[in-house]
């Protein structure tokens, strides 16, 4: 067992960088068990630095294929098309910034079909699931539209469809939805 050179406390570690539990000094235990403290290392000690310049593989490959071309051959003339050039993505950007793409009751809607409503208890649970002022509809009016145990809700936004389907997922109902574009 080795001892700390600063406070003479026992060092239990066999090898590596350790901290003395008694005085908090950073010590290095050598393979042979000898201890080297920070104060034992001379300030002007320099480590051998072996640095080899690393060549960039991409640059090497590029240099092999790049040839000098006389500048006379390279002349830039602005074509008349450049003035009227419109980005091929301009129409996509225009749509992305429009209200239609925001999904605010826009042309992308869903048709939700809920079937298997065959008991009074299921009707009650369905009404509770559909009752929410944030859905912006009258649950009583929707319940009146149930015909032969089937409720069809037209023109739902994607968000409303998602909310309703998740609320009804635990009920023993058959739920179908399809995307409709108006």
Image: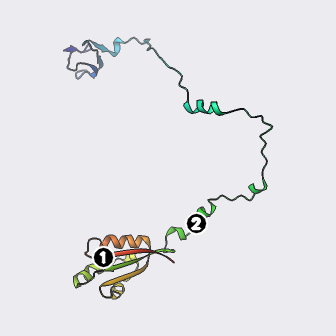
Numbered badge on residue 21:
none
| Mark 1 burial class by Cα count in 10 Å: few <14, some 14-19, many 20+ | few
Q: Earlier in the sequence, mark 2 or mark 1?
A: 2
Q: x and y percent of residue 128 in the render? A: 28, 78
Numbered badge on residue 174:
1
Q: Residue at x 58, y 66 (%)?
A: 95
Q: Is residue 123 left or right of residue 113?
A: left
Q: x and y percent of residue 41 in the render? A: 37, 12
Q: Residue furthest front?
A: 65
Q: Quadrant of the N terminus?
A: top left
- The answer to which quarter of the image holds residue 88 is bottom right
Position of 2 relative to 163 (above/below): above
- The answer to which quarter of the image holds residue 98 is bottom right
Callout 1 secondary element: strand
Q: x and y percent of residue 81 in the render? A: 75, 57
In this rendered view, identify the residue nearer to me: 125 or 6. Answer: 125
Question: Can residue 134 be seen from the camera position used here?
Answer: no
Q: Is residue 106 left or right of residue 9?
A: right
Q: Is residue 10 left or right of residue 93?
A: left
Position of 60 relative to 51 (above/below): below
Q: Residue at x 70, y 32 (%)?
A: 67
User: To which residue does mark 2 refer?
Assistant: 95
Q: x and y percent of residue 149 in the render? A: 29, 85
């Amino acid at each position: 067992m080795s001892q700390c050179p600063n406070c003479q406390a026992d060092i239990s570690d066999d090898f590596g960088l350790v901290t003395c539990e008694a005085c908090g000094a950073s010590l290095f235990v050598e393979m042979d068990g000898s201890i080297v403290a920070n104060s034992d290392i001379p300030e002007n000690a320099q480590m051998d630095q072996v640095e080899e310049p690393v060549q960039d593989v991409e640059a090497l490959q590029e240099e092999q294929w790049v040839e000098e071309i006389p500048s006379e051959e390279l002349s830039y003339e602005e074509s008349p098309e450049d003035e009227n050039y419109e980005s091929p993505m301009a129409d996509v950007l225009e749509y992305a910034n429009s209200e239609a793409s925001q999904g605010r009751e826009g042309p992308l809607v869903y048709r939700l079909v809920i079937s298997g409503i065959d008991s009074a208890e299921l009707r009650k649970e369905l009404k509770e699931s559909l009752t929410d002022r944030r859905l912006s509809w009258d649950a009583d009016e929707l319940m009146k539209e149930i015909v032969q145990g089937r409720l069809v809700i037209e023109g739902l936004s994607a968000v409303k469809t998602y909310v309703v389907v998740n609320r009804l997922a635990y009920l023993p109902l058959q739920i179908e939805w399809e995307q409709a574009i108006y």
